[in-house]
Amino acid sequence: MVEAEIHVVDRGHIRTDVNRIIEGYTRATAAEPDPELAIGEGPVYNLLIDHPEGVLLWDTGSHPDAGKGHWPAPQYEAFEHYDAEEYPLDESLEGVGYGIEDVDFVLQTHLHLDHAGGLEYFAGTDVPIYVHEAELKHAYYNAVRSGGSDAYVLADFDHDLNWQVLHRERERHLTDIEFLHLPGHTPGVVGTLLHLDERTLLLTSDEAYVRANYEEELPLGGELLWSKPHWQRSLRWLKDLERRHDALVVAGHDAEDVERLRSELG
């Protein structure tokens, strides 16, 4: 167990069709052949983990110019981060008492446009950027192929960065913090198991976009699901880890989970 201070870093809010978040959320029937679709909204957040061995930034959020052309128009239409401009990474970190210069390590849980938009702050530095090999390869292929396919934006991560590539299913680079390979949402999602003095936290990233993906085992919608069999295996592993460590599970974009985490952290 490690004594570490954790801060939730607010990065705004993102909206999308709930059918992308939960498979088959809205379905047509004979009685209702043209049902009304629903838009869901969730938080975008990063975590700042002040660990005895250094300060770890968990994800870098959306680029502040997401709605001003940094994201391709079809991606912004599908995933509207309407207040990204109000939450640039540097100012958001200042809100919890830190600066970019205080960050010693970065973990990119994956490289989607709402998770990797702050990497430019670390271009040309020696700050280690942890990312899974499968994610880095997949992101470059998709972004180069079409400029923004599958919610990857090349301009987010095509920088002079000190990539530290993860290869294994489970890796530990800081005491009592484990990086977990959770393919499903994308090929290289990385979750995090933090063994703190008070309790254990299990951060799913977008393996579980919202709590219903986790608790009710409702898969993500097709646009957010690279592989359902991989997603199901990753979910089973997360649930096993939760049981074995009595962990607090935090989903990737669930407002109640984020508030629960804030409460737990005091």
Image (cartoon, grey):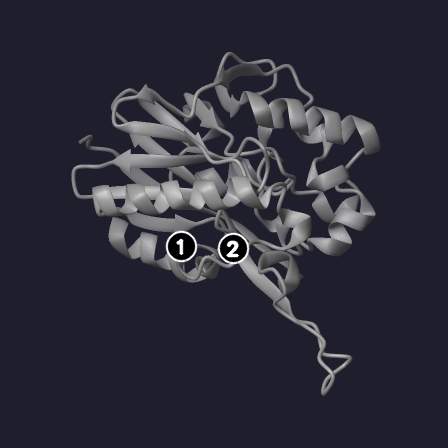
Nearer-the-camera pick, 186 or 148: 186
| Label drawn at residue 99 | none
Residue in the picture at 70% in, 72% down = 37
Q: For this view, does 223 lie left or right of residue 116? A: right
Q: Can you name the residue that lies furthest to the bottom here? A: 31
Distance, label 1 to label 2, CA atoms, is 8 Å
What is the x, y in percent for residue 36? Answer: 71, 78
Q: Which residue is mark 2?
A: 43
**Left or right of residue 189: residue 211:** left
Disc 2 element: strand
Residue drawn where x is 28% and y is 57% of the image: 263
The residue shown at (50%, 53%) is 253
- Graded by Cα atoms within 10 Å as few (under 14), some (14 to 19) or many (20 or more), the crowding at tag 2 reads some
The residue labelled by disc 1 is 258
Q: Could you say whether the residue bearing mark 1 is in a helix, strand or loop?
A: helix
Q: Position of residue 44 (x, y in %)?
A: 53, 50
State yes or no: discs 1 and 2 in contact (Cβ < 8 Å): yes
Image vertical order of residue 151 relative to residue 178, above or below:
below
> Could you tell which of marks 1 and 2 lies nearer the N-terminus?
2
Q: Is residue 27 left or right of residue 208?
A: right
Whether 237 is drawn above or below 140: the answer is below
Residue 251 horizontal/vertical position (percent): 43, 51
- Kind of residue indicated by mark 1: Val
Q: Give the answer, above or below, for where 261 lies relative to 109.
A: below
